[in-house]
């Protein structure tokens, strides 16, 4: 899957998106902060970090994946991922058909909270073996396609059609509400085959950030979301989503590409 610029770059900035992708490839294949090469010398990950100018803290990185062919080295993937301090242990239950040597997608199972959702791997080749049905540590971040902010759980349930009394056979009348920290495969929400996740979480904090990626200055909001699997950083642009109700303690419901960075920091 290509980089999801639409989550953190204004929709109208099509020229910037095209130029940014081109400049990432040009600049970050010439020089990177870190280069990983597999033991068989066939796959390469090149990583370059970027900082928030306001805080001078590293908040993300660009990862370029190259495949060494017989006669050339082929660029197969460019990814942007947000840095997270929270490590999540996932069972990589099912590899999805949309996977390729450029991108691998899985339905995963979070071991502690028993949540199923879909992810896209980043730095996949830092792990040599097949990871399907294996338990692997990952650092998660999210890039939304759709996002709504709700001030309270009650307002979220009402907006999404929940919170109503229903007659349940042998149980009686019960109010049906939505789990405020739900995580699930998002394709039922989008109606297409592109792997994604539906996630609800509570806003821990948020901040305006400004980053320099391949000599392009980009401003967006970084939300720290308390989800069922822990703190997940989320990149959003206020021109693409209605963020007027964004505040600490608000609930965010989103359909997003969840990046699972497999690079071990231990």
Image (cartoon, rainbow, N blue to C red):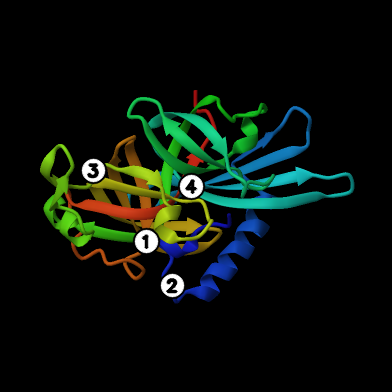
Q: Residue at x 63, y 64 (%)?
A: 22
Dot 3 crowding, Cα within 10 Å, few <14, some 14–19, many 20+: few
x, y percent for residue 151: 14, 56
Q: Which residue is mark 1?
A: 146
* Mark in the foreground, 4 or 3: 3
Characterize the local packing of mark 2: few (<14), some (14-19) or many (20 or more) Cα atoms within 10 angstroms.
Answer: few
Q: Which corner quadrant holds the N terminus?
A: bottom right
Residue at x 60%, y 29% (from the top left corner): 131
Q: Which residue is mark 4?
A: 81
User: Mark 2 sits on what residue?
Assistant: 11
Q: Specify which label sits upstream in the sequence, 1 or 4.
A: 4
Work out whether mark 4 precedes mark 2 in sequence or the reverse, and give the earlier one.
Answer: 2
CA separation in Å, label 4 and label 3: 27 Å
Q: Which mark is residue 257?
A: none
Task: Give the residue displayed 69% in from the left and 51% down from the top.
Answer: 76
Q: Nearer the viewer, residue 259 or 24?
A: 259
Categorize mark 1 by other alpha carbons within 10 Å: few (<14), some (14-19), many (20+): some
Give the residue at the far right of this rendering.
71
In the image, is 26 to the left or to the right of 183? right
Is 137 located above or below residue 21 in the figure?
above
* Relative horizontal placement of residue 228, taking residue 197 as reference (left or right): left
User: Is there CB contact under 8 Å for labels 3 and 2?
Assistant: no
Which of the two discs, 1 and 2, sits closer to the camera?
1
Pointer 3: what residue? 179
Residue 251 image point, x, y percent: 21, 51
């Amino acid at each position: 899957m290509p980089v999801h610029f639409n989550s953190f770059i204004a929709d109208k900035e099509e020229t910037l998106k095209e130029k940014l992708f081109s400049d990432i490839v040009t600049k970050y294949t010439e020089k990177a902060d870190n280069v990983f090469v597999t033991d068989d010398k066939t796959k390469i990950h090149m990583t370059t970090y970027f900082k928030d100018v306001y805080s001078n803290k590293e908040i993300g990185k660009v990862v370029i994946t190259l495949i060494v062919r017989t006669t050339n080295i082929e660029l197969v993937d460019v990814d942007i991922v947000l840095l997270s301090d929270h490590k999540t242990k996932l069972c990589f239950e099912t590899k999805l058909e949309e996977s390729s040597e450029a991108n691998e997608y899985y339905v995963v199972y979070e071991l502690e909270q028993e949540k199923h959702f879909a992810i896209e791997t980043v730095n996949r080749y830092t792990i040599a073996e097949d990871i399907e049905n294996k338990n692997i540590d990952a650092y998660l971040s999210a890039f939304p396609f759709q996002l709504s902010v709700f001030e309270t759980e009650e307002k979220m349930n009402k907006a999404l059609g929940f919170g109503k009394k229903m007659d349940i056979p042998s149980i009686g009348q019960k109010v049906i509400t939505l789990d405020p920290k739900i995580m699930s495969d998002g394709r039922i929400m989008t109606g297409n085959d592109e792997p994604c996740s539906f996630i609800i979480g509570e806003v821990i904090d948020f901040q305006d950030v400004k980053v320099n990626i391949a000599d392009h200055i980009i401003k967006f909001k970084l939300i720290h979301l308390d989800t069922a699997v822990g703190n997940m950083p989320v990149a959003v642009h206020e021109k693409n989503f209605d963020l007027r109700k964004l505040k600490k303690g608000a609930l965010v419901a989103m359909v997003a590409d969840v990046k699972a960075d497999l690079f071990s920091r231990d």
